[in-house]
Each structure stands twice: as C-alpha cells, then as structure tokens.
Image: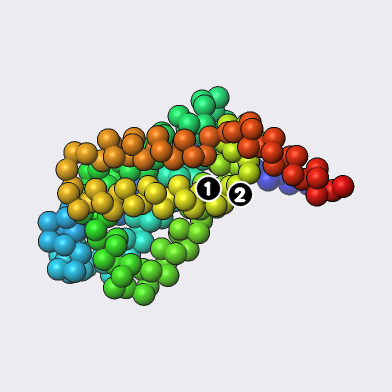
C-alpha cells in the first residue's frame, strides 16, 4: 500500500504564488489610496476612472472596496472585543475610533460616499447590504454587552446598534463639511451621550422583569 506524502515545507511554487498574491493585495491597496486622494482633491463626480488607473473597472468599485474594508475591520474588532476584559464603554469607544481612522486621514471620503449613495444605484444597493452586515455585527457586540450586564436589556440589541450607527454616521457627515481636526472631539462627545442612553439600568431592568411577571399571572 502506497502512502501519500505531504511536503513538510512549502514548495517554491507555493512561495512564489504567495508573493504574487501579496503583491496583488499591495497593488490594490495602493490603487485604493490613490483613488481616495483623488476623490479628496478633485471630488467624486469629477474623478474619472482614467485618473486612477485602467485596472479599476469603475469608481463605484473603489467606494464598495472601502465599505468592504471597513466591514472586515469591524469583524476583527468585534471578534477581539468578545474575548476582551475591557469595559464595554471602552470597547465601543475603541471600535468607533478605529472605524473612523480612514475618514480622519481623508475627510472627502465621507462626502464621496454620500454623493455616490445619492447618485449611483449600484453603490446604494451594495452599501445597503454592507450596512445590514455592519448592523448585525454591532448588534452581536451590543448583545454581548447586555449579557455582561453593562448595556441596558430593555431594548433590542439591533435597535441600539442602529441608533448607534446613525449617530456616528451623522457625526461623520457634519464633520466632513468642515474637514478640520475636530473629529475626535465630536466623536467623544457623541459617545458620551450615546453611552448615557444605553448603559445598564438596574431599575429599568427590574421594572421590565416585574412587568413580564405580571403578564404571566
């Protein structure tokens, strides 16, 4: 009977393939950064595909790539946060600051996203799907905070996640009109107000349990 052998070390062919994949990813990253810079300099509507590179099918692909990049970042943050011992207030603060790193570097990206959402059906559809996944991920994190008795439980986690996202996006939108150095301050202010509204409330949750008990009688 012949035994199948497996290489202990990766083959040269596999190493070459890995380098090619890595170079391809680096190229896409450079194209993406170049596109964001052009959006900031010329505006989304005035930037042509040729301005970026013939390798990019459409401008819409750049914005959808940005949405997917942010989604991947959120997935990693939520996964790590579930294993963290940090208080949920600090976890959510870190999450928002991490998710707004790109807009801080390039304020025009927020304006470009808004303009594309208003003018491009393809971008709008793709972004709605990404927003739904974002909401579900944040809802998981909110539910985790509820299970840890750090976030109020009298509201569905998905509803809290939606209000959270709307507030942060609104903060980004208003800041993008100025594009100055005030984003971190604006975010911190929004976070304080948001946390005051979603923090665990023993009295409110006791009242909810009492009402449920009364409904069962």
Say if 37 sits above or below 144 in the image: below
Distance from the alpha carbon under mark 2 to that under mark 1: 7 Å
Q: Picture quarter containing residue 64? A: bottom left
Side of 198 relative to 56 (left or right): right
Q: Which residue is mark 2?
A: 156
Side of 122 relative to 103 (left or right): right
- The residue under the point 19% across, 69% down is 45
* Secondary structure under the numbered disc 1 in the rendered image: helix
Q: Percent position (x, y) of residue 27?
A: 28, 52
- The residue under the point 80% across, 49% down is 215
In the drawing, what numbered circle is on residue 160? 1
Nearest the eye: 137 or 59? 137
Say if 186 sits above or below 173 in the image: above
Residue 12 appears in the picture as rendered: no
* Secondary structure under the numbered disc 2 in the rendered image: loop
Nearest the eye: 52 or 183? 183
Residue 1 appears in the picture as rendered: yes
Q: Percent position (x, y) of residue 110?
A: 27, 55
- The residue under the point 16% across, 62% down is 43
Q: Percent position (x, y) of residue 189?
A: 33, 36
Q: Disc 2 vs disc 1: Cβ atoms closer than 8 Å?
A: yes
Q: Picture quarter containing residue 42? A: bottom left
Q: How many marks?
A: 2
Residue density around tag 1, few if under 14, some if 14–19, many if 20 or more, within 10 Å: many
Side of 84 relative to 174 (left or right): right
Q: Specify the farthest residue to the top.
A: 85
- The residue under the point 41% across, 53% down is 166
In the drawing, what numbered circle is on residue 133? none
Residue density around tag 2, few if under 14, some if 14–19, many if 20 or more, within 10 Å: few
Nearest the eye: 23 or 75? 75
């Amino acid at each position: 009977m012949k035994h199948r052998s497996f290489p202990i070390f990766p083959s040269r062919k596999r190493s070459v393939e890995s380098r090619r994949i890595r170079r391809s990813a680096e190229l896409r990253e450079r194209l993406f950064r170049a596109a964001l810079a052009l959006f900031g300099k010329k505006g989304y509507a005035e930037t042509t595909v040729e301005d970026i590179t013939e390798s990019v099918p459409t401008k819409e692909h750049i914005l959808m790539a940005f949405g997917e990049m942010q989604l991947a970042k959120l997935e990693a943050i939520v996964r790590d946060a579930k294993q963290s011992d940090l208080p949920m207030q600090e976890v959510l603060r870190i999450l928002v600051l991490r998710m707004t790193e790109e807009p801080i570097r390039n304020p025009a990206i927020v304006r470009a996203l808004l303009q594309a959402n208003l003018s491009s059906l393809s971008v709008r559809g793709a972004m709605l799907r990404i927003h739904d996944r974002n909401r579900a991920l944040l809802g998981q994190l909110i539910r985790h905070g509820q299970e840890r008795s750090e976030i109020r439980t009298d509201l569905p986690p998905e509803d809290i996640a939606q209000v959270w996202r709307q507030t942060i996006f609104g903060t980004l939108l208003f800041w993008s009109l100025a594009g100055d150095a005030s984003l971190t301050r604006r975010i911190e202010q929004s976070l304080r107000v948001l946390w005051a509204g979603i923090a665990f409330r023993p009295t409110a949750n006791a009242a909810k349990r009492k009402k449920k008990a009364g409904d069962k009688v």
